[in-house]
Amino acid sequence: QVQLVESGGGLVQPGGSLRLSCAASGSIFSINTMGWYRQAPGEQRELVARITSGGWKNYASSVSGRFTISRDNAKNTVYLQMNSLKPEDTAVYYCYADGRLVTMRAFSSWGQGTQVTMSS
């Protein structure tokens, strides 16, 4: 009942930048946490960054200082600005959100993923 649509992935040279976006839609009453996770081939999915409705943020140590998460609560959208990209940032990036539906039931949803790849 909640759909997350990601955009902004692609191919970039090491040291470059990308901005990911994720828009939530559906029968949403409120969104608590929105965030980004990533999964590289052969690896487990890991947290990249997350942000609460009140603006509290936390980052994986591997991206702290290079990535910035932000959100537009009015648009139910979360962004991830990725700077100084490294080859090890290559992964599929997944958007995540949790909160409450208009029925007051809790929800948690994942996006379909967007590929971020460093070019050689």
Image (cartoon, rainbow, N blue to C red):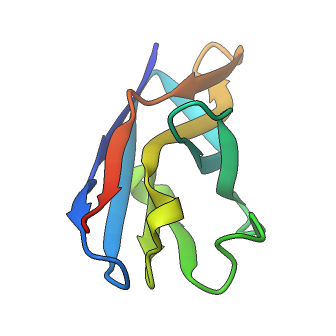
Q: Nearer the viewer, residue 54 or 94?
A: 94
Q: Is residue 28 left or right of residue 32?
A: left
User: What residue is at 47 percent from the left and 73 percent from the top?
Assistant: 86
Q: Is residue 33 visible?
A: no
Q: Position of residue 101 (x, y in %)?
A: 60, 21
Report how many numbered discs are placed on residues in the image.
0
Q: Is residue 8 left or right of residue 56?
A: left
- Quadrant where the C terminus is found in the figure: bottom left
Q: Is residue 99 above or below residue 23?
A: above
Q: Position of residue 49 (x, y in %)?
A: 66, 60
User: What residue is at 45 percent from the left and 47 percent from the top?
Assistant: 91
Q: Is residue 85 left or right of residue 53?
A: left
Q: Position of residue 62 (x, y in %)?
A: 70, 70
Q: Nearer the viewer, residue 54 or 39?
A: 39
User: What residue is at 50 percent from the left and 34 percent from the top?
Assistant: 41
User: What residue is at 45 percent from the left and 66 percent from the top?
Assistant: 87
Q: Is residue 75 visible?
A: yes
